[in-house]
Image (cartoon, rainbow, N blue to C red):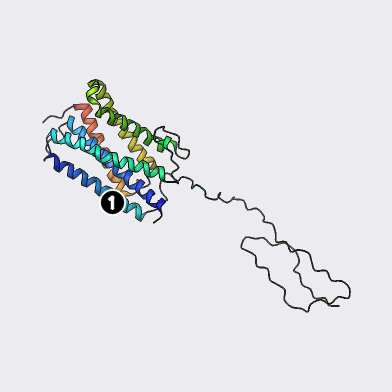
Amino acid sequence: MDPQLVVWLVARATGVAAYIALCLAILSGVALRTSVLDFLATNRALRSLHDFMTWIWIPLGIAHVTALLLDRTAQIGPLDLVVPFQVSYAPVAIGLGTLSLDIVVVVTVTSWLRRGLDDRLWRWLHRTSYVAFVLLFLHGLLSGTDFSSPLISSLSWSAALGIGLLAVARIAFGRLPE
Amino acid sequence: MPAWSLKLSAAFITLFVLVGSFDYASGHLKNPAAPLQPPVAGAPAPASTTPEPSVGPSIGPLLTVRPGQRTASATSGPRLTLAPGVQTASLAPITLTHTS
């Protein structure tokens, strides 16, 4: 098989998988602050899942951007992974992904350095992951090659709606009543 | 549910999505409905919409027959095969029928 074709397939597959892994990470994070998954597991187990998902989506995200760097058709350079809205043929669609990646990296690194940070500052930084998720969803919607597929589209929309509902419930009610 | 089973379930879900997406992408290499269609690097420029007349084939110097010189008998000359899209010149067909 043509190496460029393999790179293209890897970029597409890891993009969808990284999105789902990040959805699970955010879902378990929101569940910590609401009681929505209390029927399933304790907060300690959910926290463990939340931390674990980082080690699932990071390799998938790295594989996604590495494959796009190697893909000659995508025409994405190393600078495009950091500086958004630079890609000539789709600055917004790809730039949203770059912006989302930047935020997620900040959220992850500050979580690892949490002990050295002010708790209030850390919380606000961590809350920007909601913004990152919205940007990631828009990135997938505007640039995802497979987003028009009914199966992948329904999966992506369901995950996004689920997280959206939980986020609204979290803002409106805080921890849900038992 | 214990933490390990949550982790295992999440890892399986992600793996399932990864393999399923790869399989789907392998079966749909090109999606005409994809939102992004980046220009292919190194591809030839798209053809112009208005056709331009191509240069007709040059026939070369015509055969000059000196007075008194015999020409070859009426044999069929070499045939010119034109590639599709090549416009022919509006010249009369060359047929040498004169013999002295």
Q: Name the outermost residue toward the right.
A: B67
**Image position, residue A8 (x, y; %):** 39, 49
Q: Looking at the figure, which quarter contains the C terminus of chain A?
A: top left
Q: Name the outermost residue toward the bottom.
A: B73
**Image position, residue B47 (x, y; %):** 57, 51
Q: Is residue A105 visible?
A: yes
- Which element type, helix, strand or loop, lies under badge 1? helix
Q: Is residue A172 left or right of residue B75?
A: left
Q: Which residue is mark 1?
A: B20
Pick whichever, B3 or B1, lies toward us.
B3
Q: Is residue A52 left or right of residue A139?
A: left
- Residue at figure coordinates x 42%, y 46% from the top left: A71
- Residue at figure coordinates x 23%, y 25% from the top left: A114
Residue A106, by quadrant, is top left
Q: To which chain does the residue with label 1 belong?
A: B
Q: Is residue A104 left or right of residue B89?
A: left
- Residue at figure coordinates x 18%, y 37% from the top left: A49
Pick whichever, B26 or A153, lies toward us.
B26
Q: Residues within 10 Å of mark 1 (few under 14, many from 20)?
A: some
